[in-house]
Amino acid sequence: MNIEIKNILAIRPRESGDAKLEKTDVYIQGNKIAAIGKAPEGFAAEKTIDGTDRILTPGLINCHTHSYMSFMRNVADDLAFMDWLFGRVDPIEQKMTDEDAYWGACLAILEMMKSGTSCFNDMQMNICQTTKAVKESGMRAVICRGLVGSGNDEAGQSRLHQAYEERDAFADCDRLSFRLGPHAPYTCDEAFLRIVAEEAKKNGMGIHMHLSESRTEIENCRKDYGCSPIELAERTGLFELPFIAAHCVQIDDKDMDILKKHDVSVVTNPASNMKLGNGFAPVPEMLKRGINVCVGTDGAASNNSLNLIHEMSLLALIHKGTHLDPQCVSAEEVFRMATVNGAKALGLEAEIGAIEVGKKADLAIFKQKCPSMWPRNNPVAAFSYSANGSECESMIIDGEVTMENGKVLTMDEERILFETEKIMERIGR
Amino acid sequence: MNIEIKNILAIRPRESGDAKLEKTDVYIQGNKIAAIGKAPEGFAAEKTIDGTDRILTPGLINCHTHSYMSFMRNVADDLAFMDWLFGRVDPIEQKMTDEDAYWGACLAILEMMKSGTSCFNDMQMNICQTTKAVKESGMRAVICRGLVGSGNDEAGQSRLHQAYEERDAFADCDRLSFRLGPHAPYTCDEAFLRIVAEEAKKNGMGIHMHLSESRTEIENCRKDYGCSPIELAERTGLFELPFIAAHCVQIDDKDMDILKKHDVSVVTNPASNMKLGNGFAPVPEMLKRGINVCVGTDGAASNNSLNLIHEMSLLALIHKGTHLDPQCVSAEEVFRMATVNGAKALGLEAEIGAIEVGKKADLAIFKQKCPSMWPRNNPVAAFSYSANGSECESMIIDGEVTMENGKVLTMDEERILFETEKIMERIGR
């Protein structure tokens, strides 16, 4: 569809330096941004969106979540990690059906879309259902097949092969891409990680993995392998592939050198890292080294929100607190992390994460004229410090209007809320 | 007006222990909660609110802000403290007129009401305008006359006397109470603080003061007075009065003993403390000692939001991060800090902060059936971890419906946004 967005304040992030702010018109043809400022020759708008008193940003990119866990929001809080995982989360997940996973993913997508996110990177054991929800909802996602196993484990290997089947089954939807998701060093042994690395190379797939999240993980890795999780991932060959490392909380200078050397992208998850008592990732230090840092919410069982605006605000605040430095991690840096850096991490920098002619039309429209964003002072700072996410009014993903005036057009919100509540009544309480 | 709220999930915080959750009906007569569960004899509702799929909480209490600075949101970010204060905030404040202060306070009240806050504690140099905005808007507030000065300073003393005049001028509005607000140890000398203490005693007023916010403040206080700011406040006699100390970031065991001994309430401002690079207040340690800790947003120039839900989430997360302990500062503790503890700090515990028969009807109604709060798992956790504030749908303050279905009924939102933008065009850019 030909869409024109008139008279809007566009925040156009750049790979480095401050975002460019301009009051302009944006023209969409098919699934792409066709022009900015001046309509393309012969352009006939089928839909016009009035951008007055509104802000246009690239759709935000949530680089680490476990979408279907959304119905486990607020079921396991203020608990020690083992009680959280084995006492509450695991027992519910064990009882989950495929259909539950589908509705869980739908609820997650609903929440993300309503707070400005147009693309997410998901790690799941049951990916088909999430993939189906993404396809139907108009969302964009990278789907990472969660893998656990050891070198000799047939189950682990058969999951690997399912990953290719799942990828092939959804080859017709170009809003979807796929990666392998070896879970973590404590659930995949070294032999299995080597197999995953080889398979990924053969099949042209990138990797997404939890790395260096907790102190226990580091201690056990050193005991089992004599090295840090980052060093372990390096020596298995995994870092020779496009790699997104989730968390990286407990890392040292040597680890950061390795991450930089292999151009590994790091997704930081501030809420989850604090909530589970793991601490603060060295984000300012990684940025200083030129490591590509992006941002994720993690799953709703450990956050308990998939609102990336909330995560952006944490990111802008916490490192100023830990470093006793008000200039540490600026609003501009946070905005890049949630847009261009996220796109780069997912290998989609040519397609999304910016407002540029030729890029996919993945765009979020936020109200500016509302108490939380007002007056019209620095709109980039408003995203990191003032917005709560509910200012998001409309979403365009892959050139399709998926949300308009707060209403998601591609999903049945009432049904999703009904079904997810029913799941928790059945298996969660 | 007689109001009934039917079939609502009430979160009824208690002074200690978990909040009581119950699906119930709440009956309001005049400005008070007349009954819970069963209508009072002969009750005829003039207004019925359907509470289905909604949560009722006490109106939240923001215990430290500078309301009229709301138009300075996002004008001074990611700056060193001195550049923030003297380079940006001060020059704008110098140019501010009385009318500007009025519209600034209106914008602040609008934002607070829309995110569930029914009462705030304000420190200002120009209190009349804020007081007027509070009176008109139906909000509840404690207004603290900001004071700076030295023992011999006539201006300081004349401001003190203005405080009583301002209090007397608004004696007809029982949603307002007044305190003296000596600004900080670095803007009021010891002789002046002693005068303030004596005056407050004579005039029956409590005190609100910034204490132990930054490392520089501590260093200078030790140099000038040979003691910590907390010790200084104690020796001037200020702690013999009802006292709310804002910040208390840089405090030690001895300071905490003093705070506890004098029953001083501490209001923690996590966003502001991080944003200005001051660090993290020892909230878990204060709670352990039984110090009454409540929560505030600080002003919009150093936050940049007056949404207390955002502050509650920070409070529930950051101390888990700094203490590497997922059980540190629970959702239940946070909920008490934003309600009962806040009421106690303001000396209003007999009137507000809880849903109890005989208390003032200061109530917030939040949507539960929306993606960010769904499914119906632990609703107390939902407030600390999942809500973004925009779920607040209706507000009742002092028995009056001030907001309904997201629309503030007592204020002209369009006009307030128009006027505050005009102020920044004139003096802020």
Image: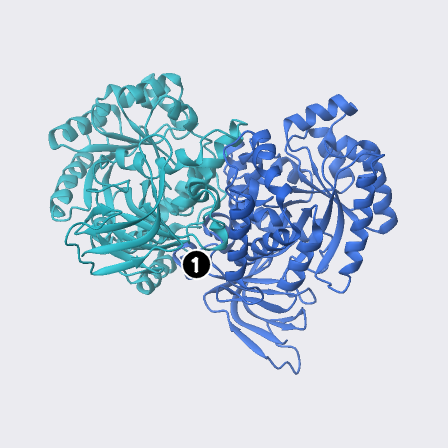
Chain colours: A blue, B cyan
Where is residue A412, by image quadrant? bottom right
Residue type beneath disc 1 = Arg
Quadrant position of the N terminus of chain A in the picture? bottom right
Rendering coords of residue B41 (x, y %): 15, 51
| Camera-nearest residue between B127 and A159 | A159
Name which residue lies at 80% across and 40% down: A156
* Residue B241 location (% of width, % of height): 20, 27
Is disc 1 surrounded by few (<14), some (14 to 19) or many (20+) residues within 10 Å? many
Report the number of discs: 1
**Residue B367 in view here:** yes
The residue identified by callout 1 is A376
From the viewer's perspective, is B354 left or right of B198? right
Where disc 1 sits, the SS reads: loop
Q: Indicate whether A281 appears above or below A124.
A: above
Q: Does any portion of residue A17 appear in the rendered image?
A: no
Between B25 and B87, the one nearer to me in the picture: B25
